[in-house]
Image (cartoon, rainbow, N blue to C red):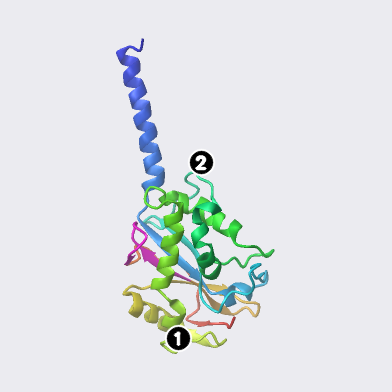
Amino acid sequence: MINSNSAILIIKLLLAQYLAIGCVSQAFDFFYFVQQWPGSYCDTKQSCCYPTTGKPKTDFSIHGLWPNYNDGSYPSNCDPDSPFDRSEISDLISRMQTSWPSLACPSSDGTGFWSHEWEKHGTCSESVLDQHRYFEAALNLKKNVDLLQILESEGIQPDGRSYSLSSISEAIRGATGYAPGIECEVGTSDNSQLYQIYVCVDTSGSNFIKCPVLPSGGCASNVEFPSF
């Protein structure tokens, strides 16, 4: 028979375990929703490989939906007991292949990329978004912020020319209401290229918000927007 002291100890241990799990899965402040330009990804010294489904369309593609803290740090790999399960998102695969392709070598169907994104980032928002809702949220966000259309409407085209960083930022701020984070990549000609764009999203994964902190992007004042 368990005495009162043992019962209290068991309750404390269970409570501590519950709180620890809660902290791991819930303790983040916002998401970075990150899209990348394939022309810049491919114009690097490591180059790229098209997916097994063929060359992606000329458009920004999803890199990830990343839980973050207001101080700029982030949680990662929060639940080793929640591996990626492709069957959980079977109804989203067609959209994923279009909007979230992998350009890493060797060529793949994207499963490894999606698995990495879920296990490193998605598991840290598990209390809010299960696996299906996590990927669906990212796909819906992309539909709601069509970066290529936003930039082209302001005369900023993927034509290999250089554009001011401020004009790119202003175009996106005008469309979303908030300043984005912009990351650049050094191309094969050692030129600064538009690579990734970060917009911030609330913890529900559905509403754009002002970024509590913007990533350091390493961009020059003028950046090339390469073709793809």
Q: Quadrant of residue 155?
A: bottom left
Residue at the limit of the structure toward the right, as seen here: 106
Side of 80 where 189 appears, left or right:
right
Query: At label 2, which amino acid type do we have?
Result: Asp
Number of labels in the image equals 2
Mark earlier in primary sequence (2, 1): 2
Q: Position of residue 19 (x, y in %)?
A: 35, 37
Q: Quadrant of residue 133?
A: bottom left
Instruction: Give the structural element (helix, strand or loop) at label 2.
Output: loop
Q: Nearer the viewer, residue 50 or 13?
A: 50
Residues packed near mark 1 inside 10 Å, few (<14), some (14 to 19) or many (20 plus): few
Q: Which mark is residue 152?
A: 1
Residues packed near mark 2 inside 10 Å, few (<14), some (14 to 19) or many (20 plus): few
In this view, the mark in front (2 or 1) = 2
The image shows residue 75, relative to residue 179, as above or below, that is above
Taking the magenta stretch, the answer to whether it contains residue 207 is: yes
Q: Nearer the viewer, residue 37 or 90?
A: 90
Residue at 65% from the left image edge and 77% from the top image edge: 188
Query: At label 1, which amino acid type do we have?
Result: Glu
Instruction: Give the structural element (helix, strand or loop) at label 1.
Output: helix
**Measured Cα–Cα span from mark 2 to mark 1:** 43 Å
Q: Position of residue 211 (x, y in %)?
A: 35, 65
Q: Position of residue 18 (x, y in %)?
A: 37, 35
Give the magenta range.
197-209
Taking the magenta stretch, the answer to whether it contains residue 89 is: no
The image shows residue 194, relative to residue 68, as above or below, that is below
Q: Is residue 216 visible?
A: no
Side of 72 where 111 appears, left or right:
right
Residue at the limit of the structure toward the top, as seen here: 1
Residue at 50% from the left image edge and 56% from the top image edge: 89
The image shows residue 214, relative to residue 224, as above or below, that is above
